[in-house]
Image: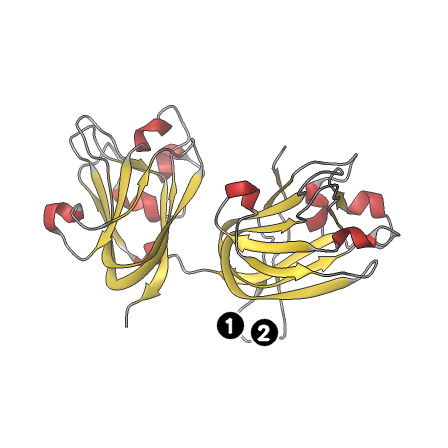
């Protein structure tokens, strides 16, 4: 499988008020599918061509297989308002019947374990149907047909929504020590491209930590951590994500949201915190001669009233 990046134009819906913007979400996106039939590649579902004229050059198709899927990586976390699916315009339109639209942050089972926005009962040949997702939050949009001997073919997938608020960007970051210019603030600067310009790092020390002050108490639903993209990705192994209101032991005594077993180089993993309450988000690696490097930390939740 190959992941394909497709930069497209950002579009707005004119019927939506300025106070509640909804965007066509393919400013940047990456798509992949479970298998590919001939030249019916995954990215053809987001090429802004609904495939009315040349079906085989503008639509996707998997092979005939069990549980075929197509997945869109939005490259950030969005609240998805609506998904529009265009069916193929030939005698095989019924192949879409029973497809599930799933939205979420998990890649477990290729993303097919995420919550369901809608189940597609049928879409007539060449038609585009809208499915309302009511602001479901997710990094991924998955179209999946459960069952054996299934083919998933899509002539266009359009996703509308808006960026979920990343609380980290308005917070203040500090860390236990700093290696050269790898300052704590670089973990909340949204920078994912240049390792040395966009990541934080402590020195090698005992129990290194990084702490984010959100300035208010929030119910934290999820923390997303992006690892460094070089030789030393394994240094994140064993890091603890802690959330709470205490600064005792530099915040490292707060309750644990998750322990990070590993994150592959350059990848972003999401950790569910189930609404844990706290002003501070800490990452700490317990032990001697440890270095904590973070290339991005994103925090999602709601302010506690």
Give the camera-side residue of 220 and 212. 220
Q: Position of residue 259 (x, y in %)?
A: 30, 40
User: Which quarter of the rendered picture does the C terminus lie within?
Assistant: bottom left
Does residue 97 appear to the left or right of 232 in the view shown?
Answer: right
Above or below: residue 23 compared with residue 191? below
Q: Position of residue 26 (x, y in %)?
A: 61, 53
Above or below: residue 176 compared with residue 8? above
Does residue 4 appear to the left or right of 178 in the view shown?
Answer: right
Residue that label 2 marks: 16
Please, which residue is most extreme toward the front here? 148
Q: Could you tell me if residue 182 is visible in this image?
A: no
Please, which residue is most extreme toward the left here? 248
Q: Is disc 2 surrounded by few (<14), some (14 to 19) or many (20+) residues within 10 Å?
A: few
User: Which quarter of the rendered picture does the N terminus lie within?
Assistant: top right
Q: Position of residue 256 (x, y in %)?
A: 25, 47
Q: Could you tell me if residue 130 is visible in this image?
A: yes
Which residue is painted at 88% across and 52% down in the image?
A: 91
Specify the color scheme. secondary structure
Does residue 10 appear to the left or right of 267 in the view shown?
Answer: right
At mark 2, the secondary structure is: loop
Which residue is painted at 17% across and 29% down in the image?
A: 205
Give the camera-side residue of 143 and 289. 143
Give the camera-side residue of 239 and 204. 239
Q: Position of residue 16 (x, y in %)?
A: 58, 74
Q: Is disc 1 surrounded by few (<14), some (14 to 19) or many (20+) residues within 10 Å?
A: few
Above or below: residue 175 compared with residue 229? below
Q: Which mark is residue 38?
A: none
Residue that label 1 marks: 20
Tags 2 and 1 in contact by the CB under 8 Å rule?
A: yes
Kindly indicate the quadrant of the structure image that contains residue 25. Answer: bottom right
Which residue is painted at 75% across and 41% down in the image?
A: 149
Does residue 1 appear to the left or right of 261 in the view shown?
Answer: right
């Amino acid at each position: 499988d190959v992941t394909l990046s497709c930069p497209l134009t950002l579009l707005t819906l004119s019927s939506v008020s300025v106070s509640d913007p909804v965007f066509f979400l393919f400013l940047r996106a990456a798509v992949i599918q479970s298998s590919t039939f001939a030249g019916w590649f995954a990215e053809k579902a987001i090429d802004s061509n609904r495939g009315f004229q040349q079906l085989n050059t503008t639509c996707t198709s998997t092979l005939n297989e069990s549980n075929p899927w197509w997945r869109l990586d939005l490259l950030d976390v969005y609240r998805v308002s609506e998904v529009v699916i265009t069916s193929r315009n030939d005698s095989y339109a019924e192949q879409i019947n029973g497809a599930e639209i799933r939205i979420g942050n998990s890649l477990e089972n290729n993303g097919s374990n995420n919550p369901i926005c809608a189940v597609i009962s049928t879409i007539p040949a060449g038609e585009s149907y809208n499915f309302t997702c009511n602001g479901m939050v997710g990094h991924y949009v998955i179209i999946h047909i459960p069952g054996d001997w299934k083919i998933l073919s899509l002539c266009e997938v359009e996703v509308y929504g808006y960026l979920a608020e990343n609380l980290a960007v308005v917070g203040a970051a500090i860390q236990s020590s700093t290696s050269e210019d790898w300052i704590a603030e670089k973990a909340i600067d949204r920078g994912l491209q240049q390792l040395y310009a966009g990541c934080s790092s402590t020195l090698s020390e005992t129990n290194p930590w990084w702490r984010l002050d959100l300035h208010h108490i929030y119910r934290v639903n999820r923390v997303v951590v992006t690892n460094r993209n070089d030789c030393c990705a394994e240094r994140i192994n064993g890091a603890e994500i802690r959330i709470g209101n205490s600064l005792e032991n530099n915040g490292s005594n707060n309750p644990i949201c998750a322990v990070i077993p590993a994150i592959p180089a350059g990848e972003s993993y999401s950790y569910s915190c189930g609404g844990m309450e706290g002003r501070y988000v800490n990452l700490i690696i317990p032990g001697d001669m440890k270095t904590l490097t973070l290339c991005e930390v994103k925090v999602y939740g709601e302010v506690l009233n």
